[in-house]
DNA sequence: CCCCGTTGTGACGGTTTTCTGACAGTTTGA
DNA sequence: TCAAACTGTCAGAAAACCGTCACAACGGGG
């Protein structure tokens, strides 16, 4: 579940496939919706990390999809990149004010699209694009798949690794068990919410080798967060 | 929270003043730097919420400023909007990959600039706009689930946390016990009205660690309100 | 100044939430 | 193919929290 999931909302078959092909190659997981209604459905079910949205769509217009995504609590903070054929300024402004994060004018350059996607994702999930994440004395290396803490080499199982990775992307932020299940385990797979506790426990034990303080904070009836100091 | 501060990095006097004038009118506080070195200095000192950066600058080029801002821990997450005269795609990509969040091609439309600024700030600052509440020396962070008062970290149980959260949304306003029960406990669940007293008491005790004055005002036969000073 | 409705607070039993060790099934890699 | 590593679930223990009560303290009107 490490790679970001991107929802592509585009009715033109050819363009959609082009987008999917290129984004797949960049290491993203792509989902496709052919019209506005399907988009809303998938956005809710899959909770993607980014939505690429055509401005002209059958059934629901892009602007409407945009507005609804912003209105829905679950998708409120999901970034949106708009694809538009019309380059008029008024349209562009309207898009940004509806809550879109960026837009691209057709015809689209794939290199530029990739750059925009990286920029937007970096903003929303800082550390995602980077190979290393550091928080306090904890270092996580995505490439080497290694974790160190203050001169200790820490061995983590796959799940604990992804869990720590996710927590480190937004340090100090509290994630509910459900959120963690969604983003660490995956939105589709079902496991007991209590399972998170167990893995947090294992993560703690691993990270506390050598008498280091507990880096995970439990927030009663809310979830967990990565947080050194106290 | 106070109005967002914007650092404008632009060597052309005329354009700089135009930008300042318009952004001031939109309710932002603006700071001005005339070259790259001054920009780095001010960015570090003032830690603005957003940087508007000309691509062509004396002393330090825009791309260099951009890179350095991203390298500095303090300014790493500060959003950057780039102003460029050249519209070549390669340049645009380079800007975004260096860590810029958006760019505008000169000549600049002020309406569009305002829209971009709004869009970028909304993305980056949900933390200050709605996820954090401040009243006097008390700070409540909904995302990190933390409460601080004048350098003291305050631990609150779930109920006290929600209670304080609610009181802070309308400081100085008096809430009756029934209102508090409705909005903090929930309209459906029934508990004794006096229970509010107990939790207010616990909240007070927690908030007064370190000899701080009592921030909760009791209004006889009416209710409670959050109110520093008196 | 006294009375009485109102509020503050320590104590306490009960409940909810979290922690943790154990365990059985599954995957992985040599 | 087999052992080691990993995973999810569960149940009991521990911890944190909750609501209620009893009584003390308070404060304003009479």
Image (cartoon, coloured by chain):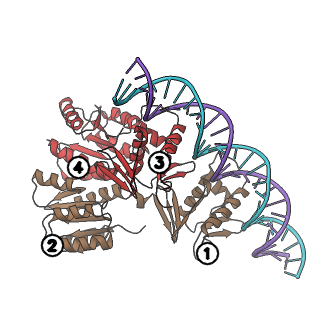
Chain colours: A red, B brown, C cyan, D purple
Mark 3 and mark 4: span between their CA atoms?
A: 36 Å
Residue B197: numbered disc: none
B195 versus B149 height, above or below: above
Residue A222 x, y percent position in the rendering: 54, 48
Residue A25 occupies quadrant: top left
Q: Which residue is mark 4?
A: A91
Residue B160 x, y percent position in the rendering: 61, 58
Q: Are marks 4 and 1 in contact (CB under 8 Å)?
A: no
Residue at image position (27%, 40%) is A53
Of tags 1 and 2, the one toward the viewer is 1
Comparing A108 with A86, the one in front is A108
Q: Which residue is mark 2?
A: B11
The secondary element bearing badge 4 is classed as helix
Residue at image position (18%, 50%) is A88
Comparing A200 with B79, the one in front is A200
Label 3 lies in what chain? A
Task: Judge from the rendering whether residue D18 lies leftward or rightward of residue C14; answer left or right.
Answer: left
- The total number of labels drawn is 4
A229 versus B88 height, above or below: below
Q: Are marks 3 and 4 in contact (CB under 8 Å)?
A: no
Label 4 lies in what chain? A
Of tags 4 and 1, the one toward the viewer is 1
Quadrant of the rendering where the C terminus of chain B is positioned: bottom right
Q: Are marks 1 and 3 in contact (CB under 8 Å)?
A: no
Q: Judge whether residue B108 can be spotted in this image.
A: no
Residue B211: numbered disc: 1
Q: Which residue is mark 3?
A: A175
Residue D21 x, y percent position in the rendering: 82, 55
């Amino acid at each position: 579940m490490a790679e970001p999931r991107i929802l592509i909302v585009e009715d033109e078959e050819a363009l959609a496939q082009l987008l999917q092909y290129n984004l797949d190659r960049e290491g993203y997981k792509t989902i496709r919706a052919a019209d506005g209604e399907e988009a809303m459905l998938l956005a809710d079910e899959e909770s993607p990390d980014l939505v690429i949205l055509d401005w002209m769509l059958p059934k629901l217009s892009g602007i409407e999809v945009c507005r609804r995504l912003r209105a829905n609590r679950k998708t409120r903070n999901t970034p949106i990149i708009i694809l538009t054929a019309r380059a008029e300024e008024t349209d562009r402004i309207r898009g940004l004010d509806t809550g879109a994060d960026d837009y691209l004018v057709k015809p689209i350059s794939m290199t530029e699209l990739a750059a925009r996607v990286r920029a937007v994702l970096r903003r929303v999930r800082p550390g995602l694009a980077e190979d290393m994440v550091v928080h306090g004395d904890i270092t996580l290396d995505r490439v080497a798949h290694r974790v160190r803490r203050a001169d200790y080499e820490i061995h983590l199982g796959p799940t604990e690794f992804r869990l720590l990775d996710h927590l480190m992307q937004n340090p100090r932020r509290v994630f509910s068990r459900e959120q963690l299940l969604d983003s660490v385990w995956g939105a589709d797979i079902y496991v007991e919410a209590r399972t998170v506790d167990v893995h947090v426990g294992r993560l703690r034990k691993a990270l506390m080798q050598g008498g280091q303080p507990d880096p995970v904070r439990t927030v009663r009836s809310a979830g967990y967060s990565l947080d050194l100091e106290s």
